[in-house]
Amino acid sequence: MLTNKRLILAHFWLAFIVFAVALVLGAWQMFVRSPLNAWHINPELYYRSVTAHGSAMGYVFPTLIAMGFGYAITEASLEKPLVGRSWAWAGFLLVAAGAVVAMVPVSLGLASVLYTFYPPMIGNPFYYIGVVMVVVGSWIWVALMSINFVAWKRENPGKPVPLAMFANVAGSLLWGWTAVGAALEILFQILPVALGLRSSIDAGLARVFFSWTLHAIVYFWLMPTYIAYYTIFPRAIGGRLYSDAMARISFILFVVVAMPIGVHHLFADPQVGAGFKFMHSVFTGLVALPTLLTVFTICASAEIASRLRGGRGAFGWIKALPWSNPIMLATALSLVMLGFGGAGGLINMSYQLDTTVHNTQWITGHFHLIFGGAIVIMYFAIAYDLWPHLTGRALESFGLMRTQLWLWFIGMIVTTFPWHYVGVLGMPRRMAFYDYANPAISPEAFSVAMSAVGGLILLISGALFLLVLVRGQLGARGEADAYRFAVPLHMPVRIPAALNSFGLWLALMVGLTVVNYGFPIAQLIALNETSVPAVYVGVGR
Amino acid sequence: MTTDTEHSLGEAVAQRIERRWATLSIVIVGLLVGMAAYIGIHQATMPQGRVETADPRTLHISGEFIESNLGSAVEADGSVTVRAIGQQYSFTPQCVVVPAETPITFRATSADVVHGFLIEGTNINTMLVPGYVSELPVRFKASGEHVMPCQEFCGIGHQGMWGKVKVVDKAAFLNMAAAKRRLTCVD
């Protein structure tokens, strides 16, 4: 029962428009830094573009998807209208306004500091204010998700909260807490300097705060994808979810262990000691657990669907899956990319192996494969699945959808595999151009050119995606059925309170963050004379 | 009634398979973490143990990072210490000279924003954060030349920040060191 269709559609449309603009920038960046570009550009334009691409893709696009999808889940799974509809619109407007406020100084070249901020470089204050507005807008959504969750539980005592909503609330709580790290960095460290109230900043402490956000934000991006795996995919291919309880355990594990692991981004940093780096490395290993559980449950759910369709044999059932169904295709391609990206992630989590690839193109390849590949392809699937229910018009271009999904997959592989390779060769990331005539760099030239071709394929796929959505918006009217989520094979009648609420898990999430971050942060705050002069950046400075 | 029993039987089987997979997952993760711990404890590669500070405002006036102290120095125990600084958009020294087959300690910091360096063809890779000293032990197997790019975005000149490392024969290095206290490629 979707009553606030306009609200949800507004989130999705804005998300995909932002995505399209950032995609064009990304493809342009791939080209200008490759040997295919005959002459160098002004490097400042490149870093300006990287800042816009990163901020849009990292902060605005996935946040809007999570919010829009979250409202859809709330209404469809709880089967009642959203509580706090006007607050939801306020959050949306805040995110939209924040995106504009942040992007104006970036476009003018006043804040080319990249989306990771990198103090002591300091850009125009409006860039940071815009980012804060986006985050505060999303916090309204975080609050609304919990309010709706609690209200439903009060009306339905003893009943299990639908899995989709449980997972959705898990994602919102994860984001609410993980955003605190960057918020502390911006509000207490960067903004006072950007506004001219202070002139020095502790860059090491800022990096620790940012790492608190930087890793768990990836799991926030991942949440809609995992929700789609568990609650859309089995239904879309005509099957059942293998296990409801295991799904809940996976989402709970994300809430608890996604946060206290961010220092693995600081393995090569001098301001955190070896002990805490090891602690965070161990917890990074733990966060592989929910993904391993998910891969099992989703593959088992696919097998159930296939056997219901008459699939036979130990592996023969794979052939009997409904491959012409875009959701089936998207999920399979997503899992392949998750497999490669996850394997890369296990390499990154080890301090010893990370020294080979730290801050090389390997890392760029890794997170584009996971986020741009495994995660975003499921955002497409979510949109394809929801669109008829939101617009009241059927999506009929199945062939076009399949082409689009395949192109995205191929484009992502062609982009990221060469990136991983040149990373192992030691190619540094985030450079506007390279001297390919240098014999030390020339072996990397061909791979960089390949990546640029991948960027072009992704651009074509992105255009096809928008085409499908626009055609859906203009298609023939026809009332869609009520939006449903996958049903588990064994419907839980009663479930333990621990798998139906978040109190304990929130306490663990905050507690573990305090344990794993408390000492490094306290140590840096206590250290004297680590504040260094700010370096203001921007055109004309 | 029979279908009910079959149903609960099926559920029990499903749960058993699921538990097995969960156990296997835990074993896999445990094994990976154990490997990392083993390598770490045996000191094959470990992050630097403690946090050291250096004020970028006074680097050039006092302390170990004054200009005349930068470069490669032979220590009393025969090891070599390399002191270097990263700044927008170069390293000092821009070309580091080191001996092969010798224990070397890199000590480096930044004079302005966050930089980093990696030495291509090796596992040497570290961040330079202003206010803090990065220290890492390294050893080069063979003589040769390596590029040493800054690997962290440090401003609009970042793409031009490439240093160099020249690894020379140990005897040749000691010869050079006999004549001069601090060595760089240009000596």
Image (cartoon, coloured by chain):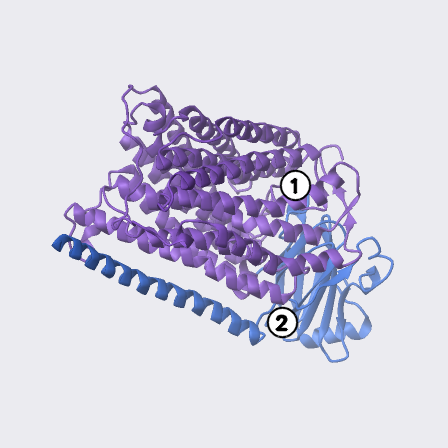
Q: How many labels sit on residues?
A: 2
Which residue position is annotated with label 1? Answer: A113
Residue count near mark 2 (Cα–Cα under 10 Å), binned few <14, some 14–19, many ≥20: some
Quadrant placement of the C terminus of chain A: top right
Whether residue B77 appears in this view of the structure is: yes
A313 over B78 or under it: above or below: above
**Tag 2: amino acid:** Arg
**Tag 1: amino acid:** Val
Horizontal side of residue A139 vs B179, given as left or right: left
Identity of the residue drawn at 25% across and 49% down: A489
Which residue position is annotated with label 2? Answer: B139
Q: Which chain is purple?
A: A
**Chain B shown in which color?**
blue
Residue at mark 2: chain:
B
* Residue A79 picture quarter: top left
Residue most toward the bottom? B77
Q: Position of residue A75 (x, y in %)?
A: 39, 33
